[in-house]
Image (tube, grey):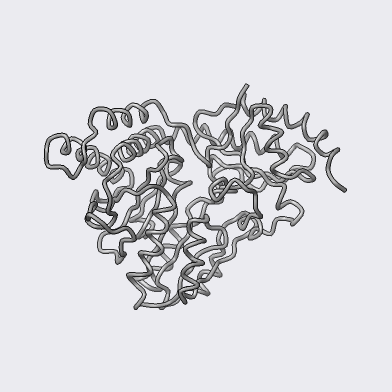
Amino acid sequence: MQAYFDNSATTKVTESVRDIVVKTMMEDYGNPSSMHMVGVKAEKYIKTAKDIIAKILKVEEKEIYFTSGGTEGNNQAIIGGTDANKRSGNKIITTKIEHASVASPMKHLEKEGYNVVYLPVDRYGVVDMTALKEEMSEDTILVSVMYVNNEVGAIQPIQEIGTYIKKINPKVLFHVDAVQAFGKMEIRPKREKIDILTVSGHKIHGPKGSGFIYIKKNTKINPIISGGGQQDGMRSGTENVPGIAGIARAAQDCYDNLEQNVSHMMELKDYLIDRLSETEGVIVNSRKGVKGAPHIVSASVAGIRSEVLLHALEEKGIYISAGSACSSNRPSVSRTLKAMNIDKDLLGATVRFSFSEFNTKEEIDYCMEQLQELLPVLRKYVRR
């Protein structure tokens, strides 16, 4: 039996996505900037994709731009947003648990002289609103908070944050990394006061190298990629039509079946948390029910390094992650777990299980069966 529990790292492309990607590569393969009919056909896929995504988010089509994924989108939001608003202030607020594609640009901006504040989180990974209220000021030009944490599944109070910061400073930019939230929950940028939202295609059964960024109309933001002026000059370069068509089809499939998919994943998550909680020496870092994302479970296994457990399960056909798989293939100390004040002895002993709608309860039973056999054996070889 095989069980793939690493869907927060990447997902398999569905047949419907595969088919439209192949069609745009083999049949409707024109350059969307070309004026002949082959180009016009390609351009139509882009217009259709914008329409699909705009309707899901309840925004305007012209507010959607396509990128190569979450990393590019986050860099566009943070670097482009601060560059366009640098005369309005010098302060940026983010959190201690952001993805590397947010944390790294923030470090770059610190070197450029910006005052970057990193908000703490509670033991569940939820941002400290009191700290935000203490730090928010009129010279704050950007607030960047992820919707769902990619390691433990903590859901941030995005609407509460957006409403508060806009009350203090209506001109502040609010950027939300929604890579782990899109396709798993209803997102309404207008209602939640979000100015810039970033999404990646390969987390929702779309192609790798695809993504989009929502930029609210009249938002001050500069492009970070210049060239031929495609996408209204916001993101130059020949559009990746197969990727754009693919992410739109994946998004449509997710939201056509959102309630059913989320209910299924939530059931799997809660079941796994219950099973893990009953296992000696295992501490679960994710929350059951709607207080946590439906597809992520973080667990610390006392006495066993995460990469050791990962490879032991791999030999049984079970695939998990040693934390986040997005920065490199070398395990490192998790900023998220440190911010949550996880016991230091467990920082290197934490793994992540992440689901899609294609996982089953039987796969979890198989995984737990193997875990129960492996843990006593692996603990015998722990260095003392």
Image location (x, y in percent) of residue 50: 26, 44
Image location (x, y in percent) of residue 171: 34, 71
At 33% from the left and 47% from the top, the residue drawn is 57
Count of numbered circles in the view: 0
**In the rendered view, would you say 306 is above or below 337?**
above
175 or 67: nearer the eye?
67
Asked which quadrant contains residue 208, the reply is top left
Image location (x, y in percent) of residue 134: 53, 74
At 63% from the left and 54% from the top, the residue drawn is 334
Image location (x, y in percent) of residue 148: 51, 50
Image side of residue 222 versus residue 376, left or right = left
At 31% from the left and 36% from the top, the residue drawn is 242
Q: Residue furthest front?
A: 227
28 or 214: nearer the eye?
28
**In the rendered view, would you say 232 is above or below 167?**
above
Image side of residue 191 versus residue 152, left or right = left
Quadrant where the image shows the N terminus:
top right
251 or 114: nearer the eye?
114
Q: Residue furthest top?
A: 1
At 39% from the left and 78% from the top, the residue drawn is 89
85 or 239: nearer the eye?
239
**In the rendered view, would you say 43 is above or below 331?**
above
Asked which quadrant contains residue 189, the reply is bottom left
Q: Residue furthest right?
A: 384
